[in-house]
Amino acid sequence: MEGETAPEARRAASKATWIALGVFVSGTVVLGTALFLVSQGLIKFHPKQQYCLTSECIEAAAGILSKINQSVDPCENFYRFACDGWIYNHPIPEDMSNYGVYPWLRHNVDLKLKALLEKPISKRRDSEAVQKAKILYASCMNENKIEKVDVKPLLSILRHSPFRWPVLESNIGPEGLWSERRFSLVQALATLRGQYSNSVFIRLYVAADDKVSNRYILKLDQASLSLASREDYLENTTEAKSYRDAFLQFMVDTAVLLGANASRAESDMKSVLKLEVKIAEIMIPYENRTSEVMYNKMNISELSALIPQFDWLGYIKKVIDTRLYPELKDIGPSENVIVRVPQYFKDLFRILENERKKTLANYLVWRMVYSRLFNLSRRFQYRWLEFSRVIHGTTTLLPQWDKCVDLVESALPYVVGKMFVNAHFQEDKKEMMEELTEGIRWAFIDMLEKENDWMDSETKRKAYEKAKAVMAKVGYPQFIMNDTYINEDIKTLKFTESDYFGNVLQTRKYAAQSDFYWLRKEVPKTEWFTSPTTVNAFYSASTNQIRFPAGELQKPFFWGTEYPR
């Protein structure tokens, strides 16, 4: 330092030393305080933020962004913020009355099934069952053949008992003329149920006994109506009346297309509609169908004494094909059944006793005809579309491929299920879902033990035991992978590509008889019987199973292990 004296230099150095010492002490205090606050959890240091830039993460983020509307303030309108994008990009299709994520996913699964069913048959790679599925699909897609045969297959049925249709008189030939003397209500109902899987007036089926859950039993319930809702027949609103008017005209026009005289058809179908209104009036509404009220166990002899107007034993024996199930030949008056709606059956046969046989026959055959309209040529389907436009608001028919996929999937669920699983289901999803289900189980048990104060100790113990015993069924039932089992199960089905209508009738007979296989057998608690392509998840009370089929475990509900969680 030029010009400074020695004492001045020493003072300057001493001052610098004190400043440095002050800075050091202050820094030490600050650092010590910070370390103390961090150790007490009062200050948290965040590591550098990590971003997932894999294709899976980008796809997941894009999926969320495509559904929202970022121009809307979520504090002002959260619904529009969260849903506008999805609604804008997914208008309701013309062949549907409503739309949402579930129908969208269902459509995506169907597109995958379409691609699988349209692959050429390989005698080497395809099992016998898969070949049958592809033949059934091909016959349904053969629209030229369907148009060429037109209504002939249905008219062939209508020319034979018990499906001669009074409204047609002799217009389809003398062999089609209905005879009141030969009409049998029991035979007609049994044939509808046993041959065509149509439940009219009575729903007969096999299911687990609600109070002896390891055994199957016959159950009797009220059947469905032509229109979807009971209220459509009973309400006097403008909308309900328009539904009934459209339905009446639809029945009349269908009969005319099949050869009926127009004025005769209108008169007869008015009587049919009046009958169905009477049935709607006596049906037990949903809110009154409680489990206790609907558990009425008795044998067939007791049922016959309670409601003697109908031959219950004769009906059941006519429905079940004992050539398929010879062990069921011994069904007799002592056979137990669960009658779910005794009052409905009492009222039903009071109505039927006082109804003209011709009206009963017209109604029963109408229900069979109605169920087969989609298997006929386009002129019948376009007439249905006019009716559907009033009821559902749909303006176009389903594409033929969509209808054909639905047919094969419903007729051969386990065959199609295996095809889907092999092509589109990853096994790591199964493990991931089982892990998630286990977490749900123990979260429930923890809540049961720590937060439940309204159950007594015994009820809580039973709830704990049931929760521990819940079985998670994920993806698909193992038996669908057994080609020998599946081939044997559908061995009676013999499809040809040139006979679509005949193929459909075979599937209806198969469906009509399949549940009787379980009568006399124990409920298999560890097995499950849900189509893998089902787009839904649910809990089965009778088997204590929570089920997640492969069809449900698809984006956007379930993304898989490579995607962010």
Image: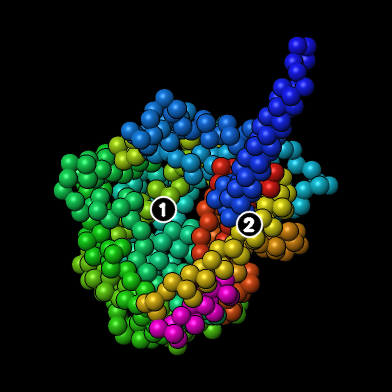
Q: Nearer the viewer, residue 161 or 138?
A: 138
Q: Nearer the viewer, residue 228 or 65?
A: 65
Residue 183, compared with residue 518, is above or below; it is above
Residue 314: quarter of image? bottom left
Residue 354, compared with residue 22, is above or below; it is below
In the image as oriented, which residue stretches furthest toward the top?
A: 3
Q: What separation in Å lies between label 2 and label 1 (alpha carbons)? A: 42 Å
Q: Which residues are magenta?
A: 456-470
Q: Is residue 204 left or right of residue 522?
A: left
| Type of the residue with mark 2 | Met
Q: Residue at x 52, y 53 (%)?
A: 536
Q: Is residue 182 left or right of residue 534?
A: left
| Type of the residue with mark 1 | Met
The residue wearing badge 1 is 368
**Rendering coords of residue 342 (x, y %):** 30, 76
Secondary structure predominantly adopted by residues drawn in magenta: helix
Q: Nearer the viewer, residue 242 or 523?
A: 523
The residue wearing badge 2 is 433
Residue 409 in sight? no
Residue 310, compared with residue 190, is above or below; it is below
